[in-house]
Image: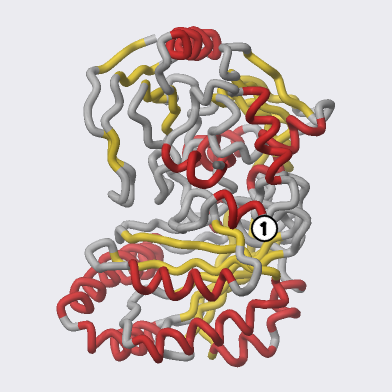
Amino acid sequence: MSSTGAGAWTNWARTVTSEPTAVVHPRSAAEVAEIVRTAAAQGQRVKPVGAGHSFTAIAQTDGVLLRMDQIAGIQHVDHATGHVRVGAGTRLHDLNPALLAHGLALPNMGDVDPQTMSGATATGTHGTGAKLTGIAGAIAALEIVTGDGTIVEVTSDDKDLFGAARVGLGALGIVTAITFACVPAFLLHAREEPMRLPEVLDGLDALVDDNDHFEFYWFPHTDCALLKRNNRVPEGTVRAPLSKARFLLDDEVLSNGGFEIVNRVGRLRPSWIPRLNAFSGGLLSAREYTDWSHEVFVSPRRVRFREMEYAIPRAHLPEVLRAIDGWVNASGEQISFPIEVRFAAPDDIWLSTGYERENAYVAVHMYHRSDHRRYFEGIEAIFGEHEGRPHWGKMHTLDADALRTRYPRFDDFRAVRDRLDPQRTFTNSYLDRVLG
């Protein structure tokens, strides 16, 4: 175990800072347990932090901050079952190539990969696919250190603990290892193309159901959308990735460097944003390629932003998008970031946004140098009218009273928390708000 001097911690989005009393780098579950026992005896709080990629204060602490970077990497591979045990501090961008070396892959993932596996699962990170759940849906087991320093192996044998801990918000204990049910490594054929939003909504069910992974981006103030359809290919298909030149032009020059300039210009001249969005939408061109799943799922994101994302019942999506369009047009707000829409299957994880519900996910963003508050407040009200469940790692204002009405097992989760962390060694201001 190594310690470093305490100093200010800031998340990636620069929305949260904290001043921990100590920063510790444990190397094993046993060391984590020792830290927890010592802190609990002294009445201190303990909070692990991963990549700091959550926009909320879920990882903030005024106590002991655990950097999980030394509990990382693949610990065991069972090739017969596809089960892979990894350290909690393993980064997605390290795990994906390591899995590929074993001929394996995660069944699904989101569109960025800096997160640690414990952080991504604890907050309910998801990708897109009507028949696929979020990343936590692939969890087969977890190793967790509870509030009294006990190391517990969580499996489906304990249905309540398993139902609660896979998306645990960091409230039940400190996850030190996770076992994922992986699948054989697979290629995806990516097809990306522009389409008008009314056409997307008219054919939405077919687009969602007839593709393994479907998502789209809509540029506010326009009817321009960019569709992404990613589908598994027959065995023996030859890998045909994007050329380096096309990747640099599309993903680095236009989607990052050029988009940063668009946002800086839009901040100085907000009235130009609708025309800039129309211009950006007009630059969209179709492309197709075939590559390993993680190479297709992940896109570089170098423009810093704030984000709010809600899960809504899939059938409500057209009405929600029409309401967002109406709010933007009436508000006078100028929105430079496209709105991202994805889809996922139901799961049985108590505080997963997908708990027993087929969802559409709608994510709204604001450039980090601009004031997001009025925009997010207006759109959050729309989500609230449609049974919206907020992504735990993204900005929202809901408290325990509101969340209880949206999660049938909310109080069951709180009961498990009372059992595993009765002294609230793992709490912070965010958990106090969302769990009560």
Visible in this render: residue 419? yes
- From what the image shows, is residue 17 above or below residue 191? above
Q: Residue at x 43, y 75 (%)?
A: 378
Where is residue 293 drawn, in percent x and y?
A: 60, 53
Left or right: where 179 falls relative to 272: right
Quadrant position of residue 161: top right
Colouring chosen for the image of the structure? secondary structure
Identify the residue under disc 1: 406
**In the drawing, does residue 352 fall left or right of residue 296?**
right
Q: Nearer the viewer, residue 58 or 196?
A: 58
Name the spot of residue 119 as percent of width and height, x first.
51, 38
Q: Residue at x 32, y 21 (%)?
A: 23
For the N terminus, give its image quadrant: top left
- Helix, strand or loop under label 1: loop
The image shows a total of numbered marks equal to 1
Task: Give whichever of 197, 404 is nearer the camera.
Answer: 404
Where, by quadrant of the figure, is residue 47 drawn? top left
The residue positioned 49% from the left and 14% from the top of the image is 36
Q: Residue furthest left?
A: 268
202 or 284: nearer the viewer: 202
Location of residue 432 with respect to 149 vertically, above or below: below
> As shown in the figure, which amino acid type bears the numbered disc 1?
Arg
